[in-house]
DNA sequence: GCCTCAAACGTTATGTTATTACATTCTTCG
DNA sequence: CGAAGAATGTAATAACATAACGTTTGAGGC
């Protein structure tokens, strides 16, 4: 697996935001979805931070910029983004993060560093996953999977060893 | 995998509660832990229901029975139970469920039926898991994993087909 | 058995996350 | 244009969770 896939590495952040927005724009156009100003701004806020943000964090920034100030403003935008694969909810944190692999259909897995609070999104092969196997043997049909691991990222591990 | 492992099947419920309580009693004694009345009752409430209960559901039943009526009463009991492997938190539901495999050290995986709200706990082999593999290739150290799948259980699938 | 101290418990208060309900505006399309 | 549905805004409330502090209890040392 490409380490970059997993997000604990440095990268060209200025480009990654604009690229993601462009991709989202095109995806929505192609799918007949409305990437409205609030929704687009909510996505760019998540992209800028590059970490998991609570709905109220997003809301605060949206309302500063003239959008509505009530919770549904943030929750609706985030619902749209998560529904269409542009963002994901990290259940363990009750927080949201921009998708690192849009376009591609995927079952994301997240690695959450409890020290620096970085969150990396890894791609998984759904057909080989543990849950799929369990589901197969029991007759359960999976609609959505949550795969999240908490622990220490390589960077923090290194620092604590030093 | 034994289908019973996974909890969508019928079973001898009267025994499963008392057995689990007995096992918990012994486990706590052996480990030098105090399975106090609130904690024991919280566990039996989870066992009786055999599904995921919110902390406030547990609290309501505890307070009816003369225990404290404030949220920390429930949260503290549930924290104890989850910390020592007698119960688990289902992150997707913000709810708690009695462990189906106490004693054994395990990384539980849950199958959540969105129709009947049953929750089954399956055992996993941590070393073979997807997350472990990802972690290994990226240098991430996993402390705790959340594996939850939402979908349709065999019973509900059958009914909807009929 | 008695004392000490940490753990457990109870309560008040508050913080955080999320939804319901309803009025208004914008878009789409015939 | 006009109807229908989607998107937005706001107010109110529900649901989930923790902080802080005083009191009780009981495990473990003497
Ligand atoms: Zn970036
Ligand atoms: Zn880290
Ligand atoms: Zn378990
Ligand atoms: Zn079901």
Image (cartoon, coloured by chain):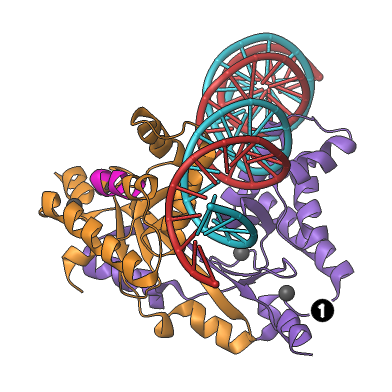
Chain colours: A orange, B purple, C red, D cyan
Residue C13 location in percent, x, y?
65, 14
Q: Which residues are magenta?
A: A42-49
Question: Is A48 contained in the magenta span?
Answer: yes
Q: Split into 4 quadrants, where in the image is the C terminus of chain A? A: top left
Above or below residue D3? Residue A107 is below
Residue D7 location in percent, x, y?
47, 51
Residue B56 is left or right of residue A32, and the answer is right
Q: Which residue is mark 1?
A: B10
Above or below residue D29? Residue A158 is below
- The residue that appears at 65% across and 64% down in the rendered structure is B102
Above or below residue B16? Residue A96 is above
Q: Nearer the viewer, residue C6 or A57?
A: A57
Image-quarter location of ligand 4: bottom right
Which image quarter: residue A19?
bottom left
What's the chain of the residue with tag 1? B
Residue D14 location in percent, x, y?
73, 39
Which image quarter: residue A141?
bottom right
């Amino acid at each position: 697996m490409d380490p970059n896939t997993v997000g604990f590495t440095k990268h060209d952040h200025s480009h990654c935001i604009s690229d993601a927005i462009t991709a989202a724009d095109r995806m929505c156009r192609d799918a007949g979805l409305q990437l409205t100003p609030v929704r687009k701004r909510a996505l760019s806020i998540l992209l800028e931070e590059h970490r998991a943000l609570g709905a109220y964090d997003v809301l605060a920034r949206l309302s500063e910029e003239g959008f509505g100030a009530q919770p549904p403003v943030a929750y609706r935008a985030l619902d749209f983004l998560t529904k269409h694969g542009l963002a994901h909810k990290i259940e363990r944190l009750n927080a949201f993060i921009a998708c690192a692999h849009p376009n591609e259909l995927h079952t994301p897995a997240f690695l959450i560093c409890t020290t620096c609070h970085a969150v990396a999104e890894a791609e998984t092969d759904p057909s080989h996953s543990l849950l799929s196997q369990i589901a197969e043997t029991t007759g359960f049909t999976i609609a959505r999977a949550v795969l999240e691991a908490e622990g220490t990222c390589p960077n923090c591990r290194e620092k604590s060893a030093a």
